[in-house]
Image (spheres, helix red, strand yellow):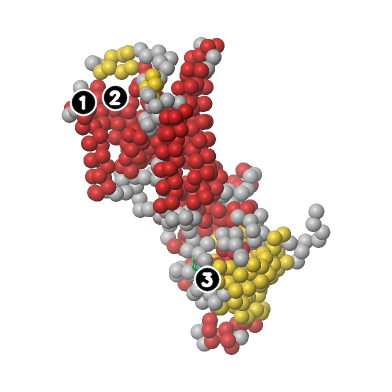
Amino acid sequence: MKMAQEKMLLEINQIEVYYEQIAALKGVSLNLERGEILAIIGANGAGKTTLINTISGVLHPRSGSVEFNGDPIHTLPAWKIARKGIMQIPEGRKVFAKQSVLENLELGAYSIKDKSAIKASIEQMYTLFPVLSERRNQLAGTLSGGEQQMLAIARGLMGHPELLLFDEPSMGLSPVMVERVFQTIQEINKQGITILLVEQNAKKSLQIANRAYVLETGRIVLADAAARLLENEQVKQAYLGG
Amino acid sequence: MFFQQLVNGITLGSIYALFALGYTMVYGILLMINFAHSEIFMVGAYLGFWALSLLPVWVQGWTPGYFILVFAIAMMGAGLLAVTIERVAYRPLRRASRLAPLISAIGVSIFLQNLVQVTVSAQSQPYPDTFKISHYEFFGVQVNSLQIFIFALAISAMVLLQVFITKTRLGKAMRATAQNHTVSQLMGINVNFIITVTFLIGGALGGLAGVLNGMYYGSIKFNMGFFPGLKAFTAAVVGGIGNIKGAMVGGFLLGIIEALTVGYISSAYKDIILFAVLILVLIFRPTGIFGEEVTEKI
Ligand SMILES: Nc1ncnc2c1ncn2[C@@H]1O[C@H](COP(=O)(O)OP(=O)(O)O)[C@@H](O)[C@H]1O
Ligand SMILES: [Mg+2]
């Protein structure tokens, strides 16, 4: 049995991640505190997806470590990491297009054994996103982009995560939907779920995050409270349109 | 004549459809053509052959249980063989080029044929005729009890498969895996386990088809999988490879086309017509009847 819960939910220590010979992360370290919203901002190609996929176990670091609740997880396959309570809302939503909305939700709960808990979660998702309830028997591929994002978020929540990873959830959405997505992330966080948010939309992310890191070509170049980064000249120049 | 050939075609189609499912299920999950599937069919037929001839008399006496046992042995054996082939010959090549597992599959196929040829027999062997065949006639069309048995068994297996993939947790995970391996893993799905289950089910259905083929034609041989395998593969392509309903429809369609060719043209032309169908489908509708665009599984 573990003693008092560790304060850090996730600790990443000096990870290097490669695609064949190309280094995408060149020694990245970061900590995630229980209950916070942490934003990682970075331009296209900075390594945001690589980072999130390394946490999820889709990719494995060549060196360095990832610890979740104090246990090293960086050698585990992705499906085991999902079962430990880390769910990812992937870039581009990636709903199971040929399956119904309801089946997508059930698949999110694949690691949950308790059938009545799954039923209850589905009802919760229908309350949180009424449009999913209306479309429950429709194929996910027929939903609009915004609806698919709602489904992808709901599918992630169905796995009862302790940590939820968002990979550019605002990508390709209308301004109204972007607003809605960021609101939803805050609501989810208020339920006690820790959030790692990776975004190119720096302004919105910094507004809802507690802390943030700036990632540039595989390296962390800045780390601070989100509010302070919003005022940072360097950040304003590069990410907030001057 | 037409209805007579239709009955024969449906019987043949039942076997092709069961056989085609293994090709299509594996393709659906791995985007790979399992050329060794024709030998799984052959080994299934042999397992049924041994079960039919070697089971003790006291087992053979009780007919329904006896047949269940025979099919269970053949299906389990063929399924486990398919799983073993995947582990040994395909999984180590998962990250290699697309061509590597294909060549490995052809190697396994040649190996199994030769193994049976050398250790069992190079000649064709008569299948035990333990099934009591009675003949019926409806409006001038001859139907026998073996044809009804084959059709009923094939349809039951297909209905069960359909229920499995649409209603169960594992079946839904299998369809998810066919769409995207990475995202399926992010849901907590052990994709390797799903692949094993796919080979198990596809192999078992192939073994079932092998036994039915042996019972229907009355003889088996080490290379018996080759032509039916090509036809079942054609059926899978005609239906839309990767699509389960497509394999079923394609199987029956091919069986019926074959029987009608035999009836109206000549049995010498049946393979020519069938492969002409394959070529026409590949030219005019390469995705098959139910097929969709090929999706990336990585
Ligand atoms: N599958 C891949 N193979 C090779 N290089 C890749 C692959 N995926 C990403 N990269 C490279 O790694 C770097 C980081 O990519 P990525 O993590 O996707 O960035 P981001 O998500 O921040 O846009 C980029 O230079 C990209 O070109
Ligand atoms: Mg990205």
Q: CA distance from mark 3 to mark 1?
A: 63 Å
- Tell whether label 3 touches label 2 (CB within 8 Å): no
What's the residue at 55%, 47% (across, down)?
Answer: B192
- From this view, report whether residue A146 is shown above or below residue B107: below
Query: Residue A211 location, x and y as percent?
Result: 65, 75
Residue type at the position of mark 1: Gly
Identify the residue under disc 3: A22
Identify the residue under disc 2: B8
> Which mark lies nearer to you, 2 or 3?
3
What's the residue at 49%, 45% (across, down)?
Answer: B89
- What element does badge 1 sit on? helix
- From this view, report whether residue A38 is shown above or below residue B117: below
- From this view, report whether residue B141 is shown above or below residue B233: above
Q: CA distance from mark 2 to mark 3?
A: 60 Å
- Tell whether label 2 touches label 1 (CB within 8 Å): yes
Identify the residue under disc 1: B263
